[in-house]
């Protein structure tokens, strides 16, 4: 059974809901054990480095910023060697109200960790979304899963199902 660390802030509402659905989808396959880790001020580098396969959840806040709980951990991440780490990021954003910074958090975490040696998985098509700009898009693909509960809640479950299947096919 493959163990995966699922990192998100337990006090969020929407991010937590998406995280739980992702956990369920992985566990339904019977091949994975998902261990949730709270990203808050108590998160240690040791906890962050515990798993080689990592799912990271981050909403985009305030014109393209990371939520404070990830932002506070950025200085620690800047010093980490992420070689050998396999990372898939799921983002939450609002393509209407955040149209110039849609899902920037995916890119903020993605580039930071990739620059330190991590391998990113689960890039997805931008078709079906309407927005101006995103730091979370590279070569026309989101650098992870893009969830928009404000405008496209009805698509959330199928997007998660497809993403988890894709990750399994990518060998995650
Ligand atoms: C003050 C505020 C600023 C936001 N800024 C952005 C943004 O710049 N880009 C974006 O894609 N979404 C933006 N959003 C949308 C959030 O990412 C979205 O509501 C998300 O579902 C929040 O998840 P959470 O409640 O788990 O943190 C913003 C939301 C709020 C409330």
Image (spheres, grey):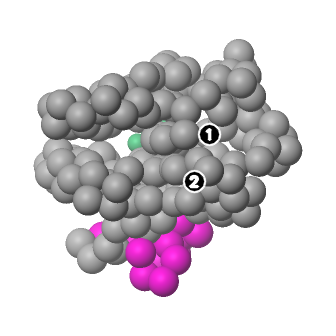
- The residue that appears at 79% across and 43% down in the rendered structure is 80
| Residue extent of the magenta highlight | 129-141
Kindly tell me whether residue 4 is visible in this rendering: yes
- The residue that appears at 40% across and 66% down in the rendered structure is 123
Q: Position of residue 171 (x, y in %)?
A: 34, 55
Using the image as rendered, state which of residue 55 and residue 12 is in the foreground: 55
- The verdict on label 1 being within 8 Å of ligand 1 is yes
Query: In screen coordinates, is 93 left or right of 169?
Result: right
Marker count (numbered):
2
- The residue where tag 2 is placed is 105
- The verdict on label 2 being within 8 Å of ligand 1 is yes
Q: Is 164 located above or below residue 64 in the figure?
A: above
Query: In screen coordinates, is 62 left or right of 32?
Result: right
Q: Is 149 located above or below residue 2 in the figure?
A: below
- The residue that appears at 51% across and 50% down in the rendered structure is 87
Q: Is 137 located above or below residue 28 in the figure?
A: below
Q: Is residue 48 magenta?
A: no
Identify the mark nearer the N-term, 2 or 1. 1
Whether residues under marks 2 and 1 lie with C-beta atoms below 8 angstroms apart, the answer is: yes
Q: Is 48 located above or below residue 53 in the figure?
A: above
- The residue where tag 1 is placed is 67
State whether the magenta stretch is mostly helix, strand or loop.
Answer: loop
Residue 26: image quadrant is top left
Kindly tell me whether residue 98 is visible in this rendering: no
Q: Secondary structure at mark 1?
A: loop
Number of residues whose C-alpha sits closer than 10 Å to that of mark 2, classed few (under 14), some (14–19) or many (20 or more): many
Using the image as rendered, state which of residue 54 and residue 101 is in the foreground: 54
Query: In screen coordinates, is 81 left or right of 96?
Result: right
């Amino acid at each position: 059974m493959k163990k995966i660390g699922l990192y998100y802030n337990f006090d969020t509402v929407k991010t937590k809901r998406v995280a739980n659905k992702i956990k369920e989808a992985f566990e339904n396959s019977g091949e994975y054990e998902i261990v949730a880790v709270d990203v808050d001020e108590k998160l240690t580098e040791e906890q962050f480095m515990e798993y080689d396969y990592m799912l990271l959840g981050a909403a985009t806040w305030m014109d393209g910023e990371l939520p404070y709980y990830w932002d506070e951990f950025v200085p620690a991440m800047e010093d980490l060697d992420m070689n050998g780490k396999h990372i898939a990021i799921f983002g939450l954003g609002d393509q209407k109200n955040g149209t110039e910074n849609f899902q920037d958090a995916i890119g903020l975490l993605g580039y930071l960790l990739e620059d330190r040696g991590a391998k990113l998985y689960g890039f997805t098509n931008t078709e079906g979304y309407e927005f101006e700009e995103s730091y979370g898009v590279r070569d026309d693909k989101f650098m992870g899963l893009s969830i928009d509960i404000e405008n496209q809640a009805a698509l959330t479950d199928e997007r998660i199902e497809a993403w988890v299947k894709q990750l399994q096919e990518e060998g995650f």
